Image (tube, rainbow, N blue to C red):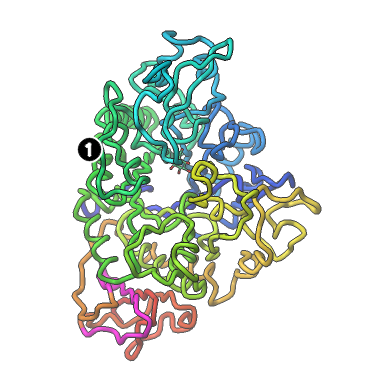
Amino acid sequence: MTPNQPHPWWADAAVYQIYVRSFADANGDGLGDLSGIIAKLDYVVSLGVDAIWLNPCYPSPQFDHGYDVSDYLEIEPDYGDLATFDRLVTAANERGLRVVMDIVPNHCSSEHPWFRAALDAGPGSAERERFYFRDGRGPNGDEPPNNWRSMFGGIAWTRTATHDGAPGQWYLHSFAPQQPDWNWSHPDVVDHFDRVLRFWLDRGVDGFRVDAPTPVGKAPGLPDAPPTPGMTDAEAVGYNPYNTFRPEGHEVWRHWRAVIDGYERDHPGRELVMVAETYAPKRPELAAEYIRPGEFRQAFCFELMSTPWAAPRLRRTIAEIVETRVDVASNTAWAMNNHDVARAATRLGRADAADDTDWVRPPIAAAHGEIDLALGTRRARAALLLMLALPGAVYLYQGEELGLPEVLDLAPEARQDPSFARTNGAELGRDGCRVPVPWTDDAATSYGFSAVASPTAPWMPQPAGWGRYAASTQVDADASTLTLFQRAIAARRDAFAQGDAPIDWLDVDDHDLVAFRRGDTVVVTNTGASARPLPAVLGRHRRVLICSAPEHSIERGAIAAQIDVPANATIWLTPG
Ligand code: GLC
């Protein structure tokens, strides 16, 4: 993009992520559903966001809550049907909201008809070619075909049984055994997904969040992964050079991009996003490969989530991303929260939040001592305001606007994330950020999650007192996180209307401050525990546009001649 060139809606969009199962339950069965989302669209509009991204809502046995798809061309019956989906798209569009679909190309469900057919058809069959079936190694093929590990713990292979119950071939799953990897060198797979993309585009969606693109495409021959000294097990899996970031995968994305470009050409007026879930926290240059010309239009940037709460580190992370991406203002999707990581309010309340630790996923409590939730919430508000000032798009996860904490004390029997069971509880898993949203303070209706009088208990238990975070108790409250969120999204639209204004770093002589100018707005984050005077280098930028510190909300618009940057806060200033 060059200045003054109109940019597509997604370039600097604020996208609100809806984890369908946990958002709003219209029929009282304890599971969120599409009708529930329709009923809450006015709330979504009140947040000021541009689009919603729906986590997978296809039919699925729900081993990985929708990331195990058994039919890519239908809606999960527990969530609704295609007619309800169409109503949702229409109702969203009528309110000026776009809809982004989640698509899962690396694997399907082990209940997908093509995988069932592959199991039935046996070794050597054409049906098995669509997946990775291999004979085992060692005597009687008892050992897996290679040493690859699964992203959810354990090995990446599961052995099948023949019709008479004898041990058979193995199949590859980069995630859970219920999620067999597709073989993308097979033309049937390519053609099927072309159809899937067009099917949802024809129903009016505005693009796709592409799930787990990095393991798509494998090295020929599936060789053993080499040793990776210095990496944790989880990192070694994520960077297995024969199963991730493969050139074969990039061919798929170039093909998808051609499909998307072609669709836009055939449908003037449609602007489609294609955003990659490129999880590569330690290798930003690998994530950047997905947004080379002719590939994805946008790729996530998860680095902020794992950056210590320390001004120099935040600056370094942001600067690194800006340097590695050619057009950061359109192809970067920032996020502080999503359905896979512990919520920011809890993460940032850790005693060691300023240190380098691998702490994005639970169990953060056990490993990192006490959590100071009030402090974490304050920092999460500051981090939100910092992120909203960056060039590019922002993806915001349901409940982030309420300052929801991670629920850490779920009973083991309540936990459903496959990574919990597959690591024998060493990883608590992701259930704690997926607890159903509190809408009201009424415990009898699961805090307003269910719209009927006596609902079935929610699929994941809500902690007692969950209503204290309810939307209904935060709305119109000056110091609430919901109010900050709404004001911040609106302020972002005004302050950064020219979405591609670059970051101009300001060298402030203070270890706890990170400061930059974008366009006419100066942004300062104080990661320290005490307030700091506004540095002189900010010059005439003395009018407070917005400040994340709850006690500061009354100062909005004030001329800040004497204003400090409060502790653990972000402030936006304009000339005045
Ligand atoms: C992505 C999703 C995650 C899912 C995994 C496997 O990382 O965000 O929720 O478990 O892919 O599909």
Relative horizontal placement of residue 81, taking residue 53 as reference (left or right): right
Q: Residue at x 40, y 59 (%)?
A: 359
| Residue 199 percent coordinates (x, y) | 49, 27
Q: Residue at x 48, y 57 (%)?
A: 363
Name the amino acid, label 1: Pro
Residue annotated with mark 1: 293
Q: Residue at x 61, y 33 (%)?
A: 76
Relative horizontal placement of residue 253, taking residue 39 as reference (left or right): left
The residue carrying pointer 1 sits among few (fewer than 14), some (14 to 19) or many (20 or more) residues within 10 Å by Cα, namely few
Q: Indicate whether 282 appears above or below 518.
A: above
| Residue 560 percent coordinates (x, y) | 35, 86
| Residue 154 percent coordinates (x, y) | 44, 37
Q: Does mark 1's beta carbon lie closer than 8 Å to ligand 1? A: no
Q: Using the image as rendered, state which of residue 273 and residue 79 is in the foreground.
A: 79
Q: Using the image as rendered, state which of residue 99 and residue 498 is in the foreground.
A: 99
Q: For residue 517: magenta?
A: yes
Report the magenta residues as a range. Answer: 514-536
Q: Indicate whether 322 appears above or below 75.
A: below
Residue 249, image quadrant: top left
Q: Is residue 96 at all visible to an observer of this figure?
A: no
For this orientation, the residue located farthest to the front is 139
Relative horizontal placement of residue 362, taking residue 534 as reference (left or right): right
Residue 509, image quadrant: bottom left
Q: How many marks?
A: 1
Q: Indicate whether 457 appears above or below 313.
A: above
For this orientation, the residue located farthest to the right is 454
| Residue 317 percent coordinates (x, y) | 26, 60
Secondary structure at numbered mark 1? loop
